[in-house]
Each structure stands twice: as C-alpha cells, then as structure tokens.
Image (cartoon, rainbow, N blue to C red):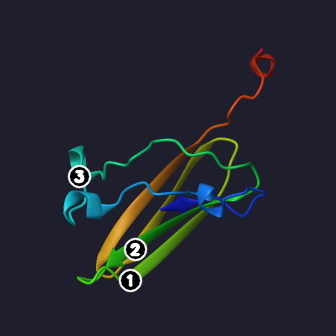
Amino acid sequence: MCSSPPQEVKDPLSRHVVLVDSHEFDGEMPMGSAGYVDLSRQVVSVELGHNLRFVIQAYSQSGAIARQSRLTFRTKYCNISRGICEIGDSKVEITVAWSQLIKNKMEIL
C-alpha cells in the first residue's frame, strides 16, 4: 500500500492505494519481466512538500499481519528516489520517478 499524508478529505481511505495484493493471486506475488512486481497502477499523486509512504506487509496463514515494513519518500519536482524495504529475509527495492502534474497548459509555454 502507498499513502499520502493527512489532508482534508472526507474519506481517509481515499489517501491509501493498494498497489499489489498477493491475496488476489493465491498468495503469490505477480511477477513481471526481470523480477519486477506488477502493480495495479503506475501513477499516484502526492502534493509537493508532502511524503509518499510505502507499507509492505507479510501475512500469516491465518491472514493476520505477521510483519510490516515502511519506506517514506519526500516529494521532489523531478528526478528519481530509490530505497530498500526489508521485511523478514526479503528485500524490496522501490524506485519512484517524480514529475509535476501540469494544472494549466499555459505553464508549459
């Protein structure tokens, strides 16, 4: 799951986006080419000056959360952020490519 910081929204769950859920794939991670995990979406929005937080959870056989790890990135105008999230004996490398969302077409002229 990834989330943005608290903001004025009516539904707090609207700040959370599940990018991949192994329960949907019989407990297996959906792996793409070259060992990459296939995500449910490729783009999320975060306001400049806020954080993007990733939460990785491992579940027990009963379905309870057995382990959890977090990784937080501060937003950037552009560039790339990389980090490693360790959970148990596994490591997940997370790469975020930042770009701005243009609100007005006149801003790019």
N-term-proximal mark, 2 vs 1: 2
- Residue 67 got which mark? 1
Identify the residue shown where x is 44% and y is 67%. 84
Q: Amino acid at mark 1?
A: Arg
| Dots 2, 1 in contact, CB < 8 A | yes
Tell whether 108 sits left or right of 41.
right
Identify the residue shown where x is 52% and y is 60%. 2
Where disc 3 sits, the SS reads loop
Tell whether 29 sits left or right of 16.
left
Q: Amino acid at mark 2?
A: Gln
Q: CA distance from mark 2 to mark 1?
A: 6 Å
Where disc 1 sits, the SS reads strand
The location of residue 19, given as percent across then percent down, is 43, 54
The location of residue 36, given as percent across then percent down, is 29, 51
Identify the residue shown where x is 22% and y is 66%. 27
The correct choice, above or below, for 1 with respect to 33 in the image is below
Count of numbered badges drawn on the protein: 3
Query: Mark 2 = which residue?
Result: 57
N-term-proximal mark, 3 vs 2: 3
- Residue 31 got which mark? 3
N-term-proximal mark, 1 vs 3: 3
Q: Amino acid at mark 3?
A: Met
Identify the residue shown where x is 69% and y is 62%. 5
Q: Which is nearer the eye, 19 or 96?
A: 19
Q: CA distance from mark 3 to mark 2?
A: 17 Å
The location of residue 96, given as percent across then percent down, is 52, 50
The location of residue 73, given as percent across then percent down, is 61, 61
| Dots 1, 3 in contact, CB < 8 A | no
